[in-house]
C-alpha cells in the first residue's frame, strides 16, 4: 500500500499544482529545475493510490542516474518497501508483484506494454520532452487512468513532438512554476548573471565570416538542403570551440577560488585542457562526462558533493537530472543555442543548500546572436536576479 510519511510537508506551489492536476488526474506540470517536482509527483501518486488502492504506477525517466534518484526519494518519503518497487535497465530486473515500476526510456520502449494489466495504471514521465520523439513515444504506449508529465521545458523547439505526442498522451500543461515564483518562495537561491564578452582570434574570425557569407548566399537562394545545415553546424562549432573560452574559464574559476564551481563546455578535449590548467594553478578539480565509466563518474560527483574537490568540469552529462545543490558558481564556457540546455544548466547551480546564500552564473559569449539571447534572458529574469556585463577581450593567460 502506498502512503506518504507524516514528515512530508508540501510546498505551497505543490499544493496548488496538485489541485490543478487532480481535477482530471492528467496533465503536464512545468517546474523550474530544483523546484521539487519529484516530491510533487509523490503527492500525485498518493492521490492516485487513494482512489485506486489496487493500482500500479509506471515511472519513465531518461537516465539510470535519475532512476536511482527516484528510488531514493520513494524510499525516503513513502512507506512503500523496496521490494514493492521494480527497476528496469542497468542490469535490474523485476521479481513480480511490485506496485511501482521504474524504468529508463530506452527500456520502456520495449517493456512498458508488457506491464499493462487489468489494474488501474498511472504513468509518470520525468523530463517528458525526451519522450516526444517517434521512437521514444513507444515508452508511452500503456493503458492508463492517470498521467503526469514533468519538465522545466516540455515544449520542443525543432519539432511538433509536444503538440503531437505529449499533449495527446499526457495531457496539456496544467500548472507552471517558473523562476520568478520559485525565487519569491525561496525555492531557488538568489542569483547573479554575469555575461562576459570575448573575441575570436584572427583565424576564427575569418572562418566565421566566410561561413556566414556562404550561409547567407544559400539562404537567399532558398536552399534548405544538407549543405546549408552542414555550414550552420560548422559555424556553430567555430563559436563553441573558440580557443579564448578555455583560458577565460580558468581565469573566472581562479577569481572565485574558495567557492564550489561547475564549469560547462561542449568538448571533452577542452575540459581536459581546463583541468590541466587549473591543476597547474593549484585548484582541486574533477570531471564528469560520458567518456568516463559509470563508477568513475559517480565517484567524481560524490567527491565534488562532499567537498573533496572545488571544481567540477562537465559537458552535457549534467544537463538533466543530476542534483548538485552544493554548487555556488556556474561557468558556462561553451553552450549550444538550446533554450532547454540553458535552463537545465542554470538549474544545476540555483538549487538551495545549507550555507548557500546565493549563486553566480558566468556565461562566456562571442557573437551578437549569443548576446541577444542573454539580453532577452535578463529581461525575463529581471525581477529575480541581478546582472552585469564584462568585456573579456583577449585573455592574458
Image: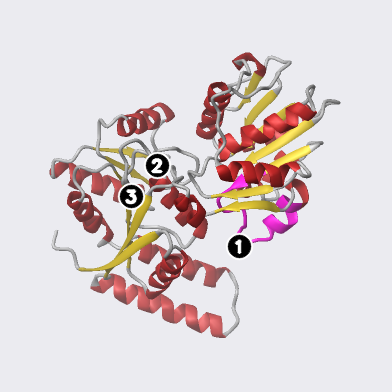
Question: In the image shown, does 53 or 211 lie closer to the viewer?
Answer: 53
Cα–Cα span, label 1 and label 2? 32 Å
Q: Are marks 3 and 2 in contact (CB under 8 Å)?
A: no
Question: In the image shown, does 347 or 320 lie closer to the viewer?
Answer: 347
Q: Of the two numbered discs 3 and 2 on the same chain, state the one appearing first in sequence.
A: 2
Give left or right: position of 24 versus 345.
right
Would you name the residue on which mark 3 appears? 359
* Relative image position of residue 396 (x, y in whole percent): 13, 63
When asked about the image quadrant of residue 275, the answer is: top left
Asked whether residue 393 is drawn in magenta, I would say no
Q: Residue at x 22, y 54 (%)?
A: 252
Circle number at residue 128:
none
Q: In which quadrant of the rendered image does the N terminus lie?
A: top right
The magenta stretch is 149-167
Compared to residue 240, the image places residue 85 above or below, namely above
Res. 167 in view:
yes
Question: In the image shown, does 33 or 105 lie closer to the viewer?
Answer: 33
Would you name the residue on which mark 1 appears? 158
Circle number at residue 352:
2
Q: Residue at x 45, y 79 (%)?
A: 214
Mark 2 surroundings within 10 Å by alpha-carbon count, few (fewer than 14), some (14 through 19), many (20 or more): many
When asked about the image quadrant of residue 15, the answer is: top right
Q: Mark 1 or mark 2: which is in front?
A: 2
What kind of element bears circle 1?
Answer: loop
* Relative image position of residue 375 (x, y in whole percent): 41, 71
Q: Are marks 1 and 2 in contact (CB under 8 Å)?
A: no
Res. 137 in view:
no
Q: Residue at x 25, y 30 (%)?
A: 308
* Relative image position of residue 292 (x, y in whole percent): 38, 35
Q: Are marks 3 and 1 in contact (CB under 8 Å)?
A: no
Q: In which quadrant of the rendered image does the C terminus lie?
A: bottom left
Amino acid at each position: 500500500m502506498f502512503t506518504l510519511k507524516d514528515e512530508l510537508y508540501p510546498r505551497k506551489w505543490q499544493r496548488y499544482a496538485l489541485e490543478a492536476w487532480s481535477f482530471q488526474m492528467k496533465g503536464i506540470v512545468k517546474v523550474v529545475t530544483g523546484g521539487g517536482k519529484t516530491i510533487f509527483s509523490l503527492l500525485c501518486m498518493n492521490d492516485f493510490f487513494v482512489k485506486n488502492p489496487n493500482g500500479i504506477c509506471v515511472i519513465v525517466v531518461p537516465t539510470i542516474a535519475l532512476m536511482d534518484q527516484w528510488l531514493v526519494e520513494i524510499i525516503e518519503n513513502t512507506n512503500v518497501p523496496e521490494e514493492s518497487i521494480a527497476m528496469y535497465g542497468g542490469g535490474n530486473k523485476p521479481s513480480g508483484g511490485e506496485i511501482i515500476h521504474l524504468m529508463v526510456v530506452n527500456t520502456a520502449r520495449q517493456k512498458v506494454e508488457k506491464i499493462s494489466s487489468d489494474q488501474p495504471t498511472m504513468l509518470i514521465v520525468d523530463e517528458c520532452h525526451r519522450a516526444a520523439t517517434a521512437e521514444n513515444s513507444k515508452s508511452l504506449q500503456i493503458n492508463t487512468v492517470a498521467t503526469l508529465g514533468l519538465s522545466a521545458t516540455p515544449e520542443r523547439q525543432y519539432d511538433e513532438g509536444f503538440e503531437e505526442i505529449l499533449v495527446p498522451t499526457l495531457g496539456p500543461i496544467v500548472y507552471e512554476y517558473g523562476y520568478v515564483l520559485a525565487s519569491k518562495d525561496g525555492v531557488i537561491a538568489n542569483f547573479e548573471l554575469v555575461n562576459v564578452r570575448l573575441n575570436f582570434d584572427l583565424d576564427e574570425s575569418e572562418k566565421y565570416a566566410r561561413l556566414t557569407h556562404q550561409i547567407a548566399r544559400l539562404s537567399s537562394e532558398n536552399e534548405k538542403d544538407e549543405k546549408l545545415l552542414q555550414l550552420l553546424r560548422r559555424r556553430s562549432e567555430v563559436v563553441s570551440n573558440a580557443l579564448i573560452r578555455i583560458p577565460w574559464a580558468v581565469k573566472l574559476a581562479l577569481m572565485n577560488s574558495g567557492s564550489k564551481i561547475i564549469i560547462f563546455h561542449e568538448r571533452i578535449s577542452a575540459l581536459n585542457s581546463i583541468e590541466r590548467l587549473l591543476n597547474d594553478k593549484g585548484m582541486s578539480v574533477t570531471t564528469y562526462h560520458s567518456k568516463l565509466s559509470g563508477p568513475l563518474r559517480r565517484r567524481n560527483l560524490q567527491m565534488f558533493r562532499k567537498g573533496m574537490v572545488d571544481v567540477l568540469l562537465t559537458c552535457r552529462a549534467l544537463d538533466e537530472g543530476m542534483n548538485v545543490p552544493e554548487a555556488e558558481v556556474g561557468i558556462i564556457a561553451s553552450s549550444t543555442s538550446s533554450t532547454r540546455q540553458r535552463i537545465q544548466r542554470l538549474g544545476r547551480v540555483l538549487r538551495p543548500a545549507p550555507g548557500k546564500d546565493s549563486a553566480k552564473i558566468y556565461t562566456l559569449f562571442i557573437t551578437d546572436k549569443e548576446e541577444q539571447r542573454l539580453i532577452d534572458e535578463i529581461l525575463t529574469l529581471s525581477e529575480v536576479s541581478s546582472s552585469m556585463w564584462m568585456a573579456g577581450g583577449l585573455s592574458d593567460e
